[in-house]
Every structure is written in C-alpha cells, then in structure tokens.
Image: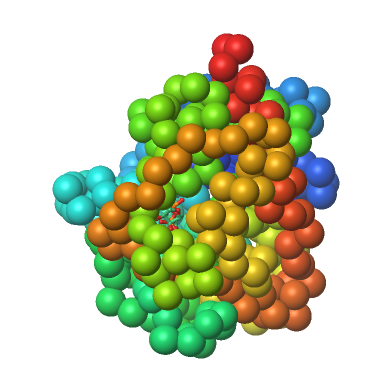
Amino acid sequence: MKKILITGGAGFIGSHTAVALFESGYLPVIVDNFSNSEATVLKGIQKICDKEFSFYEGDCTDADFLQHVFKSEENIEGVIHFAASKAVGESVEKPLEYYYNNIQSLITLLNVMNDQRCSLLVFSSSCTVYGQPDKLPVTEVTPKKQAESPYGNTKRICEEIIEDTVKSGALLKAINLRYFNPVGAHPSALIGELPLGVPNNLIPFITQTAAGMREKLMVFGDDYSTPDGTAIRDYIHVMDLAEAHVATIAFLEKTAETSYSDVINVGTGHGNSVMEVIQAFEEVSGDKLSYQIGPRRSGDIEMVYANADKSQSVLGWKAKRSLKEALDDAWRWQGTLKSK
Ligand code: UFG
C-alpha cells in the first residue's frame, strides 16, 4: 500500500480524507498537534476502516519532528497538507500566529519533503483567494483579490510559495485545491466536524441550534442582491471533498513532469442561499429551526460558487452528494455528540 502523509489528519477534512484514502487502497499516515482536534477522531477513523495506521503527535513547524516521521515511515509517497489555523475572525486578532503557523509549516514541510525526496503534494487552499469575484461561477483563472483576512492571505501566500518552488525546478508536483464550503460528516456518524466553542460556520451553528445548544441562528443579512436576499455559497459534502484529494494524488502519480503545479476548484458548481440551507435542514430534521435575521457579518461576501469543470476534466472527479445528504449526515453526527 502506498503511504500518504496527512498533516492535520485528525481535523475535519483530514479525517474524512484518511477514510477516503483507505477506501482507495492507500495507507494514510497521520500527523496532528491536536490544536483544533481530538484524539477520539483517530478511533473513529479506525472504526470506520477497521485498519491500523500510524499516528504522530507534533507540529509541522518543527523540522526535526517531520524528519522523524519520514524516517520512521521510510517510504512516504506524497503529502496532503491540511495542518493550519483556519478561523477567519481569529486571524484578524492574531495575525502573527496565523502567518507563523500556516506559512512556516508549509516551508518546513517543503524543505523536509525535498530532503526526503518526496515529491507529491496536495495543498489545502480556499476559494477565499477569489474574494467577491466580478463574474460567477469562478473558474481557476478568475483573478485573485486582495485577501479579506490574514487567514485568507496565508492561503494566497502558500499557493505562491508552492508555485515559486516548482518554478525553481525543484522536484515537486503539487496541486492547490481551492475548497468551497465543506459541510456534512461521514455517513457512519463516527467522524464529523468538532467546532471549538461557539461555531463560526453555518452548518454546525444550525445543528447546535436544532440540538438545543444555541437559542437561535442569526442569519447574517437578508439585504444582499440575491433572489431571497441572503448570501450564497457552494456547499460541498466533506466526503466528496475527501475523494477529490484521493483523485488528486492519483493524478499526480501519473503526471510525467517532475516539476509541476496547478490550482483546481473543489466545489459542486451550485450555489445555495442561507435561507435555502435552513429550509433544506428543516426538511431533513422534520422540525422548524429557530432563527432571526440580523445584520451582515463584516468581511462576508455576497455570493460565490465554483465552476467545477476543471476538477472533472483534469482529475475525473465531481461532487456526487446533495446538500440534503450533507445536512442529514451533519444532523446525525450532531446527535452522536449530544449522547457523548
Ligand atoms: N452564516 C449565518 N449565520 C451564522 C454563520 C454563517 O448567516 O451563524 C452565513 C454567512 O454569513 C455566510 C454563510 O452563512 O453567508 C456561510 O458562512 P460560513 O461561516 O459557514 O462560511 P464562509 O463562507 O464565511 O467561510 C468559509 C470557510 C472559510 C473560508 C471561506 C472562503 O469557513 O474558512 O469559506 O470563502 F475562508
């Protein structure tokens, strides 16, 4: 079995990607510092896949730690780099922490990969690099905009670091995957999203409200220029997103060039408004959701959704799960959290 290192493998997208890798015959090797995840996630992966895997607790800004992982595993074929700080609001308050964590970990990882002759890299980027695009849907050639937050800026800078490394002729084949909005959970409800404290993101806030943990959802603005006035995003099931990473690894394995980089959107190609998400959730849960319309959230954009053609033509991958499926999985996952 080919070994793929997953940094941040105990996190939301990382843990689902570990499952998807196992399902496609790869052996994930997980690294995580548990800064925004829990050890129980590893048990969930183990239970779903019924297979053993290696885990190393540590930080990707620590070169000695990463060298130790590569040496212990001997033959890591490629890396999927998720490990990063990801809260947009927090990044505004703690810019240095975000620049250090997100950029230093990538630079350290690239140096260690170079040292260890490991040349396949999938980087966890974000549609945040497009800001509010002038034209929708966004393709990969849609111009990048000035980042709205230090978090968004780290994604843009990391993409550029990877591109420049490839341009230098380094033995590196890399793809920056620009995710739209990952939602849902594994259908087994053994792994899912574990937000720290009050969730920033829409779906965990909805499921926590429906579970009685929050009084009501605040809908951030209904005065946007959209059909129902609420903001539109491209919500993608986390298992679809996980499978996109496996397809990317498989594509990079076949790529003949030794120095190669590209960017690919990972979305469904379809946008839904906040009100549409609430309605779909009410249908899935069979209950009315308590919500209130509030002011816009600062930094939010009106509307973004992907043109998903390139992922299909280059990777042969497209999203296959619906928003309702994602909400159903997220709701069942929330149910298991309540009983823990
Ligand atoms: N929303 C609410 N109420 C809430 C939470 C969210 O109305 O309590 C709305 C937001 O205003 C937005 C939509 O729901 O219109 C989605 O918001 P999320 O916070 O779930 O997601 P964002 O689109 O703001 O952010 C996500 C990721 C970021 C990433 C960004 C890229 O969380 O990491 O997409 O656009 F940078």
Pick whichever, 50 or 301, lies toward us: 301
Residue drawn at the location 68% of the way across and 34% of the way down: 285
Farthest top residue? 340
Q: Is residue 213 above or below residue 143?
A: above
Give left or right: position of 140 versus 64: right
Residue drawn at the location 74% of the way across and 23% of the way down: 47
Give left or right: position of 325 versus 262: right
Pick whichever, 310 or 237, lies toward us: 237
Specify how the rendered protein is coloured: rainbow
Determine which quarter of the picture holds residue 215: top left
Determine which quarter of the picture holds residue 307: bottom right
Residue drawn at the location 79% of the way across and 72% of the way down: 316
Pick whichever, 83 or 128, lies toward us: 128
Residue 89's spot in the image, x, y percent? 27, 49
Residue 174's spot in the image, x, y percent? 56, 69
Determine which quarter of the picture holds residue 148: bottom left
Q: Is residue 320 above or below residue 204?
A: below
Residue 254's spot in the image, x, y percent? 76, 72
**Can residue 145 be seen here?**
yes
Q: How many marks?
A: 0
Q: In this view, does 126 lie above or below 201?
A: below
Q: Is residue 283 above or below residue 36?
A: below
Residue drawn at the location 42% of the way across and 81% of the way down: 133
Tell me which image quadrant ligand 1 sits in: bottom left
Q: Quadrant of the C terminus?
A: top right
**Can residue 238 be seen here?**
no
Q: In which quarter of the image is the N terminus?
A: top right
Residue 87's spot in the image, x, y percent? 34, 47
